[in-house]
């Protein structure tokens, strides 16, 4: 069997844009996703804001197991649960939105699995990535924003929220250090896809940097469209 090549989202649905936010727990992904949604909507784009795990009805059930089950979930079972959530979510929510030409802003995607299950649970980068690529028909984001923060600083933010920790948040600091190291290695390996930002900066400044990068992708798409239509 010949392996399929990973597909940047633009290849299968020219008008859509697939943007993912990644980083450890408590780094500010939700805030930045919301600010980007607002910015794009003000520019007339239809935005679908979603997340993994839990971006579909089936996903909500899977999210409950992976984050809140009180007994053991073995590492391979955990990886498969995230992959199952992803497979269903991409097919039923994300691909249809991209095919309509919408912008999909997604909190976490396959890089979370590579960092948390591949490095944190030590299942291995390649196998976990291949599992997600198989699950999604090889869909890669056009842009992945990595919000990088020292896990001890992120932990202070989570403590301040005063909410009970879920299964992953409850892991030891060595786990979260491995996750962070893996994220940075992933970004190094794919510099064109990743925008890495220091998440200790002020939220409004981070938002400006993200908007700048998204604008340049939109400009490049518009220029491609103009070239295409001149043919
Ligand atoms: P969050 O939605 O509050 O960020 O919580 C999701 C948790 O699940 C977070 O701790 C990261 C973890 N996670 C994985 O371990 N693997 C994955 O593939 C995804 C999407 C999330």
Image (cartoon, helix red, strand yellow):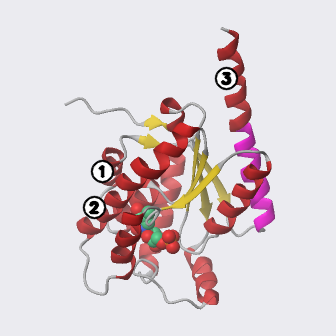
**What is the CA distance from the residue labelled 2 to the residue labelled 3?**
38 Å
In this rendering, the answer to whether 76 lies above or below 224 is: below
Please tell me in which quarter of the rendered image ligand 1 is found: bottom left
Residue marked by disc 3: 224
**What is the CA distance from the residue labelled 3 to the residue labelled 1?**
32 Å
Does any atom of ligand 1 lie closer than 8 Å to the CB of label 2? Answer: no
Quarter of the image with the N terminus is top left
Q: Nearer the viewer, residue 20 or 173?
A: 20
Which dot marks residue 131? 1
Q: Quadrant of residue 142?
A: top right
Badge 3 or badge 1: first in the primary sequence:
1
What residue range appears in magenta?
Answer: 203-216
In this rendering, the answer to whether 126 lies above or below 28 is: above
Residue marked by disc 2: 80
The crowd level at tag 3 (other Cα within 10 Å; few <14, some 14-19, many 20+) is: few
In this rendering, the answer to whether 148 lies above or below 168 is: above
- Where residue 177 appears, as percent x and y from the top left, is 48, 71
Circles 2 and 1, Cβ within 8 Å, touching? The answer is yes
Q: Nearer the viewer, mark 3 or mark 1?
A: 3
Question: From where the camera sits, is residue 178 visible?
Answer: no
User: Would residue 204 appear left or right of 22 to someone viewing this image?
Assistant: right
């Amino acid at each position: 069997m010949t392996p399929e090549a990973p597909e940047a989202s633009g290849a299968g649905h020219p008008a859509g844009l697939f943007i993912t936010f990644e980083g450890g727990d408590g780094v500010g992904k939700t805030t930045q996703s919301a600010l980007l949604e607002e910015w794009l909507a003000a520019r007339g784009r239809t935005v679908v804001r979603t997340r993994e795990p839990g971006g579909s009805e089936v996903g909500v059930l899977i999210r409950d197991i992976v984050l809140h089950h009180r007994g053991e979930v073995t590492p391979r079972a955990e990886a498969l649960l995230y992959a199952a959530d992803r497979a269903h979510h991409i097919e039923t929510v994300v691909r249809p939105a991209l095919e309509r030409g919408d912008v999909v802003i997604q909190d976490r995607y396959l890089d979370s699995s590579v960092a948390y299950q591949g490095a944190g649970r030590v299942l291995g980068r390649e196998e976990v990535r291949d599992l997600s690529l198989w699950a999604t028909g090889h869909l890669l984001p056009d842009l992945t924003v990595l919000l990088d923060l020292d896990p001890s600083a992120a932990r202070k933010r989570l403590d301040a929220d005063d909410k009970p920790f879920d299964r992953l948040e409850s892991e030891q600091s060595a786990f979260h250090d491995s996750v962070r190291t893996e994220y940075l290695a992933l970004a190094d390996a794919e510099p064109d896809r990743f925008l890495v930002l220091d998440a200790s900066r002020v939220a409004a400044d981070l938002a400006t940097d993200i908007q700048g990068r998204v604008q340049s992708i939109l400009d490049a798409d518009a220029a491609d469209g103009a070239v295409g239509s001149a043919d």
